[in-house]
């Protein structure tokens, strides 16, 4: 879901990592739903991608299944 939102904004993984102030490697793990970001990064991600409360909940549920 994060990847689709990023792509809809025509942003690369590198651009998103820069916007979030994290490494590309960290962002790739977020994009691939392999890792739940730190709270500050998650808040920034929500803002950058304009995620709805429903989308945030869905993302966190999906990540929790993987972790």
Image: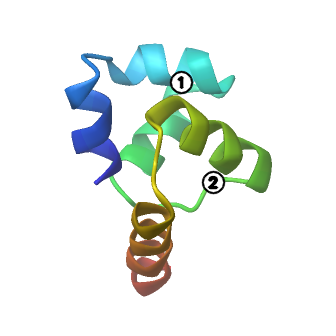
Query: Mark 1: few, some, or many residues within 10 Å (few <14, many ≥20)?
Result: many
Expressed as whole percent of the image width and height from the top left, the position of residue 63 reads: 45, 72
Above or below 15: residue 44: below
Expressed as whole percent of the image width and height from the top left, the position of residue 25 reads: 50, 34
* Residue located beneath label 1 in the image: 17
Residue at figure coordinates x 53%, y 24% from the top left: 17
Above or below 21: residue 58: below
Expressed as whole percent of the image width and height from the top left, the position of residue 61 reads: 44, 80
Residue 58 occupies quadrant: bottom left
Q: Earlier in the sequence, mark 2 or mark 1?
A: 1
Query: Mark 2: few, some, or many residues within 10 Å (few <14, many ≥20)?
Result: some
Residue 66 occupies quadrant: bottom left
Under circle 2, the secondary element is loop
Q: In the image, 5: left or right of 24?
A: left
The alpha-carbon separation of the residues under discs 2 and 1 comes to 12 Å
Under circle 1, the secondary element is helix
The residue nearer to you, when weighing 57 against 2, is: 57
Quadrant for the N terminus in the image: bottom left
Residue at figure coordinates x 41%, y 85% from the top left: 65
* Residue located beneath label 2 in the image: 37
The residue nearer to you, when weighing 6 against 26, is: 6
Q: Return the mark for residue 30.
A: none
Above or below 28: residue 9: above
Please, which residue is most extreme toward the bottom here?
65
Would residue 34 be visible to someone looking at this image?
no
Residue at figure coordinates x 37%, y 24% from the top left: 13
Q: What kind of colouring is applied to the model shown?
A: rainbow
């Amino acid at each position: 879901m994060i990847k689709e939102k990023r792509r809809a904004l025509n942003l690369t993984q590198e651009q998103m990592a820069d916007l979030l102030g994290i490494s590309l490697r960290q962002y790739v793990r977020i994009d691939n739903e392999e890792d739940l970001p730190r709270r500050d990064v998650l808040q920034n991600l929500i803002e950058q991608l304009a995620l709805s409360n429903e989308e945030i909940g869905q993302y966190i549920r999906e990540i929790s299944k993987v972790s």
